[in-house]
């Protein structure tokens, strides 16, 4: 009884602190201490549970705007967050500017450091799978389409003991994925069990005899490769032509179906952002840089503002998955055989998933608790999982090796976020009656590399939008320009509502 009273007191104090913060009444000298308190795992989990309970008691649209808050996001530019309670999912998110500021100052720098660590640098993927739709298609022979695979000994030693390693030759031209890995790194990447993500219901079962390769992601950056035209359009056409995407904007479309569509669209927008952000401007001089005209055409104009909304939505969705799995991720062993670097990886992860500013600004980026309440939810979930399986197989038809590699990684990242948010398994890391969530190594690697790609895409959109609007002359805080670029009007309710 005493422990229960203490727990309730902690929750009450935490919520009271949050209310005081929202009104801007916290003295600056106490802000750091309060941020640390709210970021502590037990308090953060308790506050999260109470907010969910409140959302069930006061449904979407009930009460005043004060019933849902994105926290205190007051900044030098005096831009405040907006609370969106429309639709079937309580999606309490920030304005474009608040997301951009949080991403630029807190989340994206940590993700950038995280994906450069040895644990998150290497991804195992099947690049030799056959296309089930257009088997006559060959691979792109352009120089920047290719991937470089890791050398045998580059794989971390703790990862290689369970698998037989065969030497591989490095690709000699830039049109293949760079497979170069140092000998010791490849050898150590082969020991962790269940690395393929096959225990994820959102991923199709694969063939155990498939030849997988380790890829050093830092040597194979996501950028313009020259892969475009009819072939690329055919791949995306097959994806958006899936039965579950037909009539996606109809009023009676289930919210889960719209969420699913927006995740795929958001990934597409992220890929577009990286293409236009790192474009081959002049092939003769090998000059790379942002393509502002292409950005304006594909992301920076009012006619395509739904693509931008879906990018930000996908970012917040996956950020929520990372926050929900925080107890598991903060306690995980990131073992690559180098204790110093592994400790640094764990420290970066902890600072990310328990970030005080993130907890304050967007404590619940996406509320998954309002989904799967309908009579036919289980049937719908199975249909969406089948559609996701189809999309992963369609990606096997991508004719650019490097594009295929990043698409496969990001699809596994999205599948991992769906597993975390839509599974009945417990993410608290504590023993109990409910089975605990188990995340495989490749799932964790894909989740955070995908989140980093989305975070980087949000930053590309922020930066290029500022350039289109006069380099911040009307946006002195460096945020919020995308609203002006896309027409300055609210996004369509049919696309905003989830």
Image (cartoon, rainbow, N blue to C red):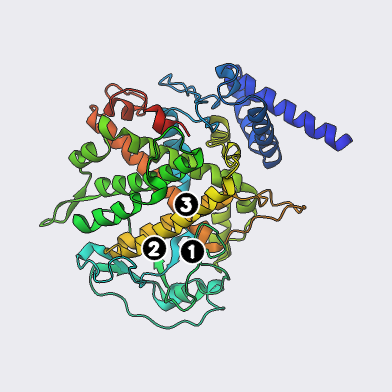
- The label on residue 414 is 3
**Circle 2 SS class:** helix
Mark linked to residue 393: 2
Q: Is residue 42 left or right of residue 245?
A: right
Mark 1 Cα-neighbour bin, 10 Å: few <14, some 14–19, many ≥20: some
Residue 234 drawn at (x, y percent) = 25, 56
Which residue position holds label 1?
204
Q: Nearer the viewer, residue 413 or 288?
A: 413
* Residue at point 40%, 21% (across, down): 77
Give left or right: position of 47 versus 456.
right
Which quadrant would residue 137 be assigned to in this image? Answer: bottom left
Residue 320 spot, x, y in % from top left: 54, 42
Rounded to the nearest angstrom, the CA distance separating label 1 from label 2 is: 9 Å
Q: CA distance from mark 2 to mark 3?
A: 15 Å
Q: Which residue is situated farthest in the right direction here?
A: 1
Q: Are dots 1 and 2 in contact, CB under 8 Å?
A: yes
**Position above or below: 37 against 245:** above
């Amino acid at each position: 009884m005493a422990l229960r009273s203490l727990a309730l007191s902690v929750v009450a104090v935490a919520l009271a602190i949050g209310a005081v913060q929202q009104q801007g009444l916290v003295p600056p000298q106490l802000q750091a201490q309060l941020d640390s308190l709210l970021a502590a795992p037990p308090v953060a989990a308790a506050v999260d549970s109470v907010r969910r309970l409140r959302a069930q008691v006061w449904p979407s649209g009930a009460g005043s705007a004060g019933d849902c808050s994105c926290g205190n996001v007051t900044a030098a530019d005096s831009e405040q967050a907006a609370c969106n309670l429309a639709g079937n999912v309580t999606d309490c998110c920030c304005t474009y500017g608040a997301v951009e500021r949080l991403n630029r100052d807190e989340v994206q720098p940590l993700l950038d450091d995280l994906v450069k660590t040895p644990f998150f640098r290497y991804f195992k993927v099947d690049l030799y799978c056959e296309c089930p739709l257009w088997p006559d298609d060959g691979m792109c022979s352009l120089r920047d389409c290719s991937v470089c695979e890791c050398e045998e000994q580059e794989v971390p030693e703790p990862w290689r003991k369970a698998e037989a390693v065969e030497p591989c030759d490095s690709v000699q031209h830039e049109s293949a994925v760079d497979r170069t890995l140092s000998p010791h790194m490849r050898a150590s990447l082969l020991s962790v069990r269940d690395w393929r993500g096959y225990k994820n219901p959102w991923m199709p079962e694969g063939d155990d005899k498939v030849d997988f390769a380790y890829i050093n992601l830092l040597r194979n950056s996501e950028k313009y490769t020259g892969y475009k035209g009819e072939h690329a359009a055919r791949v995306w056409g097959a994806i958006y032509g899936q039965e579950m995407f037909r009539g996606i904007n109809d009023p009676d479309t289930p919210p889960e179906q719209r969420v699913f569509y927006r995740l795929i669209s958001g990934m597409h927008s992220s890929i577009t952002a990286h293409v236009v952000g790192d474009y081959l401007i002049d092939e003769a001089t090998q000059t790379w840089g942002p393509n502002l005209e292409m950005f304006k055409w594909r992301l920076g104009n009012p006619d395509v503002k739904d693509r931008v909304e879906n990018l930000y939505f996908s970012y917040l969705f996956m950020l929520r998955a990372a926050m929900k799995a925080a107890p598991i991720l903060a306690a995980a062993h990131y073992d690559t055989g180098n204790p110093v670097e592994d400790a640094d990886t764990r420290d970066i992860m902890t600072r990310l998933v328990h970030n005080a500013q993130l907890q304050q600004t967007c404590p619940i980026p996406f509320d998954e608790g309002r989904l799967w309440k309908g009579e036919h939810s289980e049937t719908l979930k199975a249909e969406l999982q089948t559609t996701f399986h189809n999309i992963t197989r369609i990606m096997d038809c991508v004719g650019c090796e490097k594009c295929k590699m990043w698409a496969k990684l990001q699809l596994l990242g999205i599948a991992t976020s769906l597993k975390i948010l839509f599974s009945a398994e417990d993410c608290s890391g504590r023993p109990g009656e409910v089975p605990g969530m188990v995340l495989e190594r490749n799932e964790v690697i894909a989740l955070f590399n995908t989140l980093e790609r989305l975070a980087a895409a949000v930053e590309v959109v922020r930066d290029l939008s500022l350039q289109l609007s006069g380099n911040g002359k009307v946006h002195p805080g460096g945020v919020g320009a995308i609203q002006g670029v896309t027409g300055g009007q609210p996004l369509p309710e049919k696309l905003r509502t989830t």
